Image (tube, grey):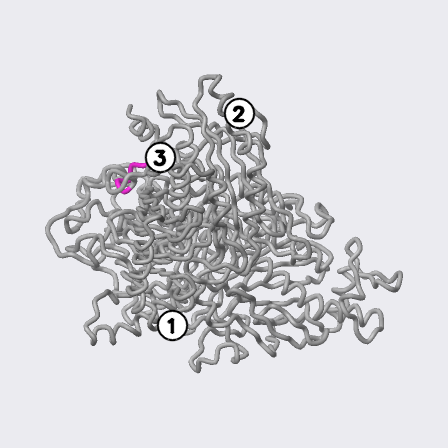
Amino acid sequence: MTSQSPVGGARFTRRKFLKATGGAVACTVMSIPGLGRAARPGAADIGTNASSVPGVASQRIDGMAKVMGEKVYARDFNARDMPGWPQQQWHAMYLRALTTEQAFEGLDLGTLAPQARPTRVVLGNELSGTLRAPKLLFNRDLMLQERIAQERARAPRAKSEGSVGSFDLPSDMTFDLIVLPGNVPNYLGQAVALLLFDNLAGFRAAKLAIEFNDAAYQVYGSGKEDGPPLGSAFSPQTTYVKYGDDFSYAKADPDTYMDQVPAYQDKIRTTLASDPALIRQPFQTDMQAMDPMFMEPEAGLVWIETDTGTMNIVLGTQSPDGDISNILSMYDSADAPIHLKAVNLTSCYPGGGFGGRDGSPFSLMLALAGTYSNGSPVRLAYDRFEQFRVGLKRHGAKLSGELAADSNMKLQAVQMTLTFDGGGERNLSPYVASLGALCAGGSYAIPMADIYAEALHTENVTGGSQRGFGGPQAFFAFETALDDLAAARGWDPAELRAANLLEEGGTTVVGGPVEQSLRLGEMLKFAQRQPLWNDRDAIRQDYAARGLIYGTGIAISLQAYGTSGDGMVASVLLERDGSLTVQSDAVDMGNGSATTLGVTIGPILGANAARVDMGCYTLFDQTGLTTQDPDGVRWANPNWTAKSVGSSSACLTGLHQVHTVQQTANALFQGSILAAAAQIWGVASLPPSDVVWRDGTLGRRSVGGGELSLQTLADEIYASGLPNGALGHAYFQNSWAAADFPTPGGLLPLQLDGLSFYQPSGGNPVQVPRQGTVGPDKASSRYARYVWAPCINVVGLTVNTSTGAVQIENVLSVLNAGHIHVPQLVSGQSQGGVAMAISYTLLEDMPTGMAGPADGMWNLNRYHVARAQDVPVLDGYEPGQRGQQLFTLEPSQGSAPVGRGIAEAVMCSIPPAISNALRDATGKRFTSLPITPAKILEGLGQ
């Protein structure tokens, strides 16, 4: 894949559609201007000449642009870079709450020098109700949304019956964006004022004066409380109780599940108490919050054309559709200062995402700033201090519970309570807690489970969905407890795991069936044979001879990928020049999605895509599908789908996005390209089995000669009016929705629930009526998750008992990634996962409250992340050297070429493996992350 230089000045990709949000709003998504196709995120050039083998990538699609410093991130741009924008821009600064114990009364800016005085100051009492506290939609997980709806329905009945419990279910709730004067802030870092400057010099002077000294400019006193009390749990909370095959979340009646839970919790306690021979292993772990550490702190531009009611935004976002919907909700009221008629989003690379930008309040703060700039563009750009102060964090958590096993090493029960620090706003915290509860069963078959998970409203920085989404917290607790159980009984820790592995056909702690081949037993046997584990006693003696204390630890994770219902949309276009374009609603967050999607169509269409256009949030509205089901007929409605699209995550490419793009490419191939080839060759019909791609040309298997290039096929398609592109929507919930679609190439069965064709004459695509739709059954919505990425990690480390310093010597990862589309990307994600895990296990120390980044004075001088010296960098294992090994399973013979989302899989089992290795080395257990030298010295009694 090669980069190309900009040609002919600025380029744009525009798609308009009508969006119903209290009225018709025209939205446009645009790519960054002035960049070559390989350099801009909107339409990146793969360069098929550089990778002539269809399906093979020669380099990252975005690599050259990023390493050469081209403008790809939102913070790279100013208003003068945007064609058609006013050249002079304003600059925005938010002041942040310093306490949750006193009311914010106002500002005192009298001591600011004249040149540092803001042009405009906006306080919370100047905002309309919806502008100050817009209703936010977090429709990420259909299972949780269904639970919210069920509990809302139960609330009136429960109250009338005198039931005890909370039914406050704010599925679309947020706190004030800017604190009302006289109110106590809901959390540290909540905005108390917006300062706007009409020139850069004034902004810089004010920032120099206020940053690190903002207490001098804010006034606090007594006032009224606002919002739920600190320490209350965000709704809904998660309870998973499983009692053998008799009762589970997946199998119980949704309307009565919670009513039956107490009785089965009693049965679990009674069953365990009746067998005094059972071995009980209690555990208690905790970990601090953690920053996602973006390459680029959040930044953006906004310009509102007041005369036309058009908002223009330049933003790097993980979920463009969700951000735009939430921004529109800010202006969807009679008292809104501006009534939007159009929204134009220029989508940039996020500069790191992985959950930290999923539901980020930044987009709302940016949109708000544009309202008060007198029609001028506004730039809002956090520096690293501000990003630490207010950027979404991975949740701190406390976990406790107990494992129970019999004398034959068979696990009988897990009891676990997971308490997540949700921080100041609800955000996605209940979703994270829910997935953490599912991961509380680890990778094992367990007959009984009693699991409760909650996320609390605290004064701390808001928790987000990044770096594991609840899995790391749960796996760390379970895997360290498992090693303690093995040590207490003198069992081999690997053999204890082997005796309890979850297999295809088993059930999870929610009672959902495992219908995917996990191959955990095969993976574990392989790991046990590797020198890092098999020779661990000899390695320990070798290090001891050098005066070093060495330990080895093993851990397994079974991280789910996707949500409990995923919608994806993509288009594949055959351009007039015979090149191919892929468009996707997904966002490439640095995980290589664009690269993968560009090459995954190669075997189907004979060439890799020349362009990959990511973040196309307008595509779904062109499908003709709807998520509204007022009659409750679901798949019987030919235009219904369970979910439109969701926010991107780093793990959705391998299965979800690839599937959608491939099915859409297949629709274009069989529905149009084969029809064009049949016309050229003068045959009535042409089944796919009769043709083959050879060196980029289409030929017939049984007839020599007459090969057709994509250019020749494009000429026929454009001349005869056959479809030149396909737009496909897919939905996955335990299985893919599937239907038959009538096409110019015949009736085509596809694992899509929506198909439209683009015509050479242009315009919106024409929807193809689907027939015989078969969708996932409704019962599967209770399974929580359906697809898994198993990983086993072995870690060898040394400990300096004088300083408490830990050095990771070697890491072995055995990963089931399914079919690997781009091996280099899997390797890169594995290396990144190892580095991230080492970093937050040993280094990333983030205290809560004003002792942490909420004070606005934290940067990388205080928040330490792993550097090259902290990570083994040698590729492979050599005795006495520091290295990493990654082994990926070959797909099972005869299995479909289906990938797995593995972005977090490797990372999740590294921390417990490190803790287990420390126990092996020192005989002491460390279960509070990060495991700092001070904690190690304290544990060793020094």
Residue under label 3, please give it: 925
Between 108 and 215, which is closer to the camera in this rendering? 215
The amino acid at mark 3 is Arg
Q: Nearer the viewer, mark 2 or mark 3?
A: 2
Taking the image as drawn, is residue 682 in sight?
yes
The amino acid at mark 1 is Asp
Helix, strand, or loop for circle 2?
helix
Q: Which quadrant of the view contains residue 708?
A: bottom right
Between 395 and 59, which is closer to the camera in this rendering? 395
Above or below for 233 versus 793: below
Between 841 and 194, which is closer to the camera in this rendering? 841
Residue at 48% over, 17% down: 546
Residue 165, how many percent across, how many down? 23, 65
What's the mark number on residue 147? Answer: none
Residue under label 2, please give it: 538
Residue under label 1, please give it: 253
Instruction: Give yes or no for residue 268 being in the magenta stretch.
Output: no
What secondary structure prevails in the magenta region? Answer: loop
Residue contact at pointers 2 and 3, CB within 8 angstroms: no
**Real-space Cα separation, disc 2 to disc 3, in angstroms:** 23 Å
**What's the magenta region?**
854-860
